[in-house]
Amino acid sequence: MSGQSENENIPSRECFDRRGFVLEEHISLEELEGLEPKFFEDFIKFVIDKDTNKVAVGMEVHKSAEVFFGRNHGNLYGGNIYFDGSIIYTSTLNIAKNLEYWEKKHPAGLLKKKIPFQGNPRIITDDELIEIIDATLFSWIEMEKNQ
């Protein structure tokens, strides 16, 4: 095999490992579901680089995508795309940026314990930031978002 599967958009098992890979062409949700190796039965992890509008998918752990975008990169956001079209914006990559983003929007110096993260700072809940992430995701992945 030359590194490509029958569908040129889907990298074969030879092309990526636990770190996933950066999308170079558009891909559909169905194609994402068919990727191997599959670490999770009902979803695939993603990481976006907000600065370059690049998307990495297929990693076992979100942090693994740092190999593509840089270890100290400040604009990486992660989440999970479920094969039913729903997206959960949760990743350890989001914690520091979630706090920064909240503090920029609310410069009154609120105590961090008052930040509305629904008890989990890994989850992005800010609608403006979710729109930015979605714009990047949907520029690469052909899918309809299911809420």
Image (cartoon, rainbow, N blue to C red):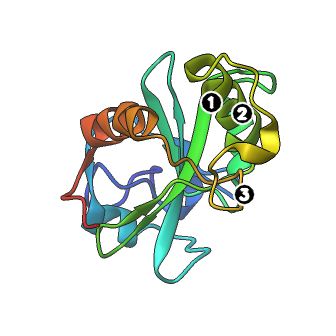
> What residue do we see at 30% from left, 49% from top?
9
Q: Is residue 50 above or below residue 55?
A: above
Kind of residue indicated by mark 1? Trp
Q: Position of residue 137 (x, y in %)?
A: 35, 41
Which disc is residue 99 wearing?
2
Q: CB under 8 Å between callouts 2 and 1?
A: yes
Q: Is residue 113 left or right of residue 87?
A: right
Q: CA distance from mark 2 to mark 1?
A: 5 Å
> What residue do we see at 30% from left, 34% from top?
135
Q: Position of residue 84 (x, y in %)?
A: 30, 76
Query: Label 2's element?
Result: helix
Q: In the image shown, does 99 or 137 lie closer to the viewer? A: 99
Q: CB under 8 Å between callouts 3 and 1?
A: no
Q: CA distance from mark 2 to mark 3?
A: 21 Å
Q: Nearer the viewer, mark 3 or mark 1?
A: 1
Residue where numbered disc 1 is placed:
102
Query: Label 3's element?
Result: loop
Labels 3 and 1: the sequence-earlier one: 3
Q: Position of residue 128 (x, y in %)?
A: 39, 32
Which disc is residue 134 wearing?
none
Quarter of the rendering containing residue 59: bottom right
Q: CA distance from mark 3 to mark 1?
A: 25 Å
Q: Nearer the viewer, mark 2 or mark 3?
A: 2
Query: Which quadrant holds the C terminus?
Result: bottom left
Labels 2 and 3: the sequence-earlier one: 3
Q: In the image shown, does 34 or 138 lie closer to the viewer? A: 138
> What residue do we see at 71% from left, 51% from top?
121
Residue where numbered disc 3 is placed:
61
Q: Is residue 16 above or below residue 65?
A: below
Q: Is residue 115 above or below residue 107?
A: below
